[in-house]
Structures are given as structure tokens and as C-alpha cells.
Image (cartoon, rainbow, N blue to C red):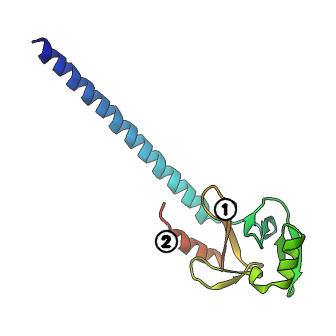
Amino acid sequence: MKNHTLSRVIKKEIFRSAGFMVIFLTITGIGVLAWSALSRNALDTGKAQVKNNLVCMVNDTYFGTEQIPVVAEGKTYYGCCQDCIAKIQNNRSVRYARDPYSGTEVDKANAFIVKRQGDTKEVLYFESKENFKRYLTTQTT
């Protein structure tokens, strides 16, 4: 009889633990979905866009501080150091990037610039805000 009672106690404990696990996973899942929706909404409203002058357009890096303006072919680009200034002035390929959505060549001086998602300072250059929004729909969360 003692083993039967112990078996019932163990079964109750397992079911109670499983119930807590289901509740925990449900709450966690709802939290993840809410965070994903909030993040996507922030990106959809253009809050992901960064100002051109805060990006080194040679290293494609967001610095968050004013970079050195460089005029080339009548347009203003930005670099972080003297080497970058020279590269912008002398190397056309540094002034252009590929739109990750359309594959079209984009002039960095006119691009819609966003920080790549995640813990990074790397930026992406888009032809337009609309291309950026389309690009988001192709990304998995």
C-alpha cells in the first residue's frame, strides 16, 4: 500500500510540474510574439532608419556620432577618418552599395539607411523605404 501511495504522490507532482511548464511556455511564447510584433512595428514606421551623417560609408558602420562629410560628384558622403575620405573621393565603388531587396545599385548619399537587425553596427542601404519594408517581409523572425 505504501508504494501505491508514493506512486500517486509522484504522479501528482509530475502533473503539477507539467502544468507549470505549460503555463511558463505559454507566457514565454506570448512574450516573444509581442516583442516580435513591437520590433516589426518599430521597423515598419521607419524608426530603424539612421541618419546618413552618423554612418561611415566606407566601412558601412553606424557610429552614432557625426562623421566627416566628403563631397564627391556633387553629393555628400561620410567617412570616419582621413583614409575613408580619400577612398570616398577616389573610389566610386565605395560610394555605392546593393539594395538587399532588389539587388539594384544604390548611391549611398541618397539611400534609405538602416542598421542591420541584431547586436551589430553594420548598416544596409536601400533604394527606398518601400524596399526596406518589402525586405522585412522576406526576413524570418
Q: Residues within 10 Å of mark 2 (few under 14, many from 20)?
A: few
Image quarter where the N terminus lies is top left
- At label 2, which amino acid type do we have? Thr
Q: Earlier in the sequence, mark 1 or mark 2?
A: 1
Q: Nearer the viewer, residue 39 or 89?
A: 89
Residue sitting at 46 percent across and 52 percent down? Answer: 33
Q: Residue furthest bottom?
A: 73
- At label 1, which amino acid type do we have? Lys
Query: In the image, is 25 to the left or to the right of 115?
Result: left
- Tell me the SS state at disc 1: loop
Q: Which residue is identified by label 1?
A: 47
14 over 3 or under it: above or below? below
Residue 139 marker? none
The span from disc 1 to disc 2 (Cα, nearest Å) is 19 Å
Q: Nearer the viewer, residue 2 or 133?
A: 2
The residue mark sitting in front, 1 or 2, is 2
- Tell me the SS state at disc 2: helix
The picture places residue 108, in percent across and down from the top left corner, at: 74, 78
Query: In the image, is 8 to the left or to the right of 33?
Result: left
Q: Residue furthest top?
A: 2
59 over 27 or under it: above or below? below
Residue 138 marker? 2
Q: Nearer the viewer, residue 113 or 3?
A: 3
The picture places residue 126, in percent across and down from the top left corner, at: 65, 76
Residue sitting at 83 percent across and 59 percent down? Answer: 65
The picture places residue 10, in percent across and down from the top left corner, at: 22, 22
Residue sitting at 26 percent across and 28 percent down? Answer: 14
The picture places residue 85, in percent across and down from the top left corner, at: 87, 75
Q: Find residue 134 and report its image quarter.
A: bottom right
48 over 78 or under it: above or below? above
